[in-house]
Amino acid sequence: MENNSDYFQMRNNTHNTNNLPTLSSYDSFIFYHLILAILFLIGLSAHNTSHGSSEANIESTYTWDNTITIPTLRSPQSEFNTEQIYLPANIFIPSSPKPEQGYPVLIFINSWAMNESQYKSQAKKFANEGYIVLSYTTRGFRGSPGLIDTAGPKDIADTSSAITWLIDNYPVNTNSIALGGISYGSGIALLTAIQDNRVAAVIAMSTWGSLIESLWGGETPQETWLDILLGAAGWPIGRPNPEMQEMANNMFNYQNITPTLFWANTRSPIHYIKKVNNRERMPAVYVSNNLHDYLFQPNSIIEFLTQYKGPWRLDLNSGIHGTGEASGLLGSNTSYPWVIAKAWLNHYLKGENNNINKRGKVNTVVQSRTREGTPNIRESFLDLPVTDITNDLVFALVPQGDNTGSLSAAPATIMDVEQHINTTKQQVGSGGIFGALQGAGLRVQFDEIDTENALIFTTEILDKTLHLRGSASLTFFAKVEHSSQFFAYLLAYNEATGKAHWIGHAPLTWHLPEGESEVPNNPTELSMNFYWTANDIDKGDRLVLIIDGKDGDYWRYKDTPETNTIVFGNEYPAKLVLPRTLGITPFLPLDDQGNVDSSLGGNGSNAESSAAGGSINWTFSLISLLLLGFRQHFRQQFRQQFRQHLCTISKYWPAITRQYRSDSVNIRYFLK
């Protein structure tokens, strides 16, 4: 507790507050304690006292061993330190006859704050397909020795050690080794595959291409998800390396930028793109991400795949971080990403001719409320980018002088004007975890947007549907100061209902380079890239662009100015560019994909009750994240009061939980 007190104090000074209804002091305090009680009871009920328990395999299609550990070096980068640590693991071995060259292998790596039991349901399915499946817990989490390395060099060395250990102890096909994971595990899997020539394929779900673009996109920390990551890494679930908090503080205070970028680049697959492209044998990379994942947004992994020369496939699903793949962990046989993952490995590891390499490389759910479209259908594209630049729709921002204006696709004369907005009152916002879960269903009451606090630009009523596919971009000029913040939002506005539906957003903070103190005298050109989306804006609607100065999901720097000044004129043009297709593109399913839920991606049904052994942790994690999202709706003073009570609880927590392992919620998260 003491190690983080300075951090809590520093965060309290400038913590975000949203313009949302608040409860009374008494109700807020009671509600926080109610949430804690619920999570504590769920944690105890979901609690396992071991890393797994024996269970009968009625069909005798595999054997399972949960008593194994993976030996690895505590300090793999040190040539003098040969001390070994042992990572908890389990293994499924198929009972089918051993192939001539050995069994294909799949190694699962746990998500953040999870353990090796997470993938139990899928491990059984792959074992039934003839795979040896190893799952292990990364260092620093859930009783695994060492400190959390945040997908750093030690984590990569551990995964390579797991490969070596399997080759030395089991009859594996050394040419058919795959790595897989969700979130944290997916990043480690992809980073290892890039650097270890023995890896033939990767299953990377809810993954990242650039850690800096994910956690600090637009040089603006994603506070909501950083809170969750930092909180879940602490006691009793994990043992974080102090450098993790140091890097977070660097982002929160815009300091020590060079070492922070180095730390993040070391953990970013795109940093190694030239190295992997020069390999003779490149791993076959399957990626499944989610369109409303504001932790690992699609943009950076799309950039990685755009440059990657090996075989790859990308599926984009509805949902937030991890939800697109969750039903597969709950045992669903129809979970789209997992069905594709199995077909991917069967093709590249077992040589099955299932035509997955001949289908679209990019397959995305489309958020559509149009008369011609169907909600959450998929479209397939042959490659990246999915649009032709010649079809881009370019709008000029034409101000009217009252913080409103039009989006004009035709040439227009721009009046010379400066428009000012107050940055202390959020108008739209990205909606937090709950808003992201609603996705394109998130709605804004358009007439409640205050133009003193935001700029509003609208198109004429659309005479045909606009098929937005990709990352929109916005450029404009502003008079900037250190830590000036801008948040841009795209909405589809229906005049009949007065509602504006969510399309996408982009954050940006302008910083003075370290060591400099003078801000520019002239207006500065700013560029913002929206997060990748696939969305249909219906004919009869208007496309709306909002430029705001505050978003409660993002960190607000202590020296962010209270006013933004945006400058317009013929010398200071502003434009919005929308990548689009000219119609609906057909989806190309696999040959045997008739019973797959390909719409929502991970929200299929028919979960098997037998999956509970490994998936209860995942379910508990998702429930916890949803409840934790409530933190954004209450005032700072109630949070502080709540922290004081939790400090008292934490003092006695070890005695309470001595006989339990840490499947219960990480209460330290609430201290933020």
Image: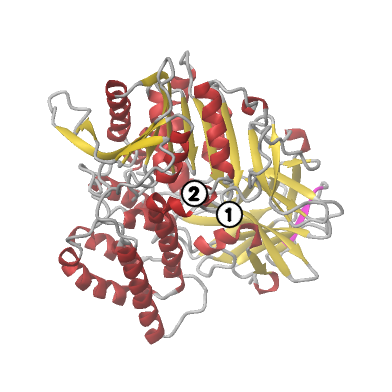
Write the start and end of the magenta stretch as one range: 405-409
Image side of residue 558 versus residue 245, left or right: right
Quarter of the image for residue 169 reads top left
Mark 2 or mark 1, earlier in chain: 2
Q: Which residue is mark 1?
A: 605
The percent position of residue 82, horizontal first and vertical second, equals: 14, 27
Label 2 element class: loop
Q: Amino acid at mark 2?
A: Gly
Q: Residue at x 47, y 39 (%)?
A: 125
Closest to the observer: 51 or 395?
51
Q: CA distance from mark 2 to mark 1?
A: 9 Å
Q: Give the main secondary structure of the magenta stretch.
A: strand
The percent position of residue 143, horizontal first and vertical second, equals: 23, 48
Q: Quadrant of the C terminus?
A: bottom left
Q: Is residue 408 magenta?
A: yes
Q: Crowdedness of circle 1 by 10 Å Cα count: few (<14), some, many (20+)? A: some
- Label drawn at residue 331: 2
Label 1 element class: loop
Q: Residue at x 52, y 73 (%)?
A: 19
Q: Is residue 636 visible?
A: yes
The percent position of residue 430, horizontal first and vertical second, equals: 55, 60
CB under 8 Å between callouts 2 and 1? Answer: no
Q: Residue at x 50, y 56 (%)?
A: 485
